[in-house]
Amino acid sequence: MGTVIMHSVTSVDGFIADGNDDVGPLHDWYFNGDTPITATGDQEYDHSGAGSRFKVSKASAEYVRPMWDAIGTIVMGRTLFDLVDGWEGSPPAGDHVVVVSHRPKPEGWHPEASYHFVDDVTAAIAKAQELAGERIVSVNAGEVGGQIFAAGLVDEVAMDVVPVVFGSGKRYFGGVDGQHLLEHPHVVVQGDGVLHLKFKVRR
């Protein structure tokens, strides 16, 4: 089975959005460089709906490109699915998406897309790994990601840290209680307006 990586862009104080799900400047680094994340250009999608292409610094591209290429399945919560309308059936990376939700897929929503709705985090990771095979399962941070992390189902934590302090909002680890130890970062990459970090979860 592939590695399960919890991943998101975050503020220095650990927030992935404000209380209204506004990401503010967190995604600016996706558009402040001159290097496309993929060699053929990226899907025309961003959270603002402006349709800008992802162009980042060379250092960020060299970090993000192989990770996105290795993703087989994305696991997300229903809140993010609703916010971005499931990327209209075309995720930014990977071939499959598993949505953790007690509500089913919206009727008639992109039947051609490999999106699977599961109401339990353990079952969601099992389904995601089945779909991904040896490829990476990428878990979006937030409440659902935090539940998956707390259940011991995450192998690595990847954070794209942006130099901004939110003060409050939606936490990277959601409502996780207690201490959880990580190994020393095995990846540290400084991009333009972002610091890419990866930690293995200590077992």
Image: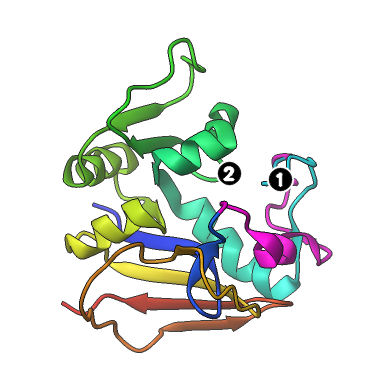
Q: How far across and how far down the image is residue 71, in percent?
A: 44, 50
Q: Which residue lies furthest to the bottom in this view?
A: 184
- Residue at 68% from the left image edge and 78% from the top image edge: 191
Residue 77 as seen in the image, left or right of residue 65: left
Q: How many labels does the image show?
A: 2
Say whether residue 75 is left or right of residue 81. left
Vertical placement of residue 154 versus 200, above or below: above
Earlier-in-chain disc, 2 versus 1: 1
Give SS at disc 2.
Answer: loop
Q: Mark 2 points at which residue?
A: 92
Magenta span includes 23: yes
Vertical arrangement, residue 6 with respect to residue 49, above or below: below
Of the numbered discs in the image, which one, if any, rests on residue 111? Answer: none
Residue in the image at 69% along x and 57% along y: 37
Quarter of the picture holding the C terminus: bottom left
According to the image, label 1 marks what residue?
42
What x and y, as percent, mark residue 82? Answer: 50, 34
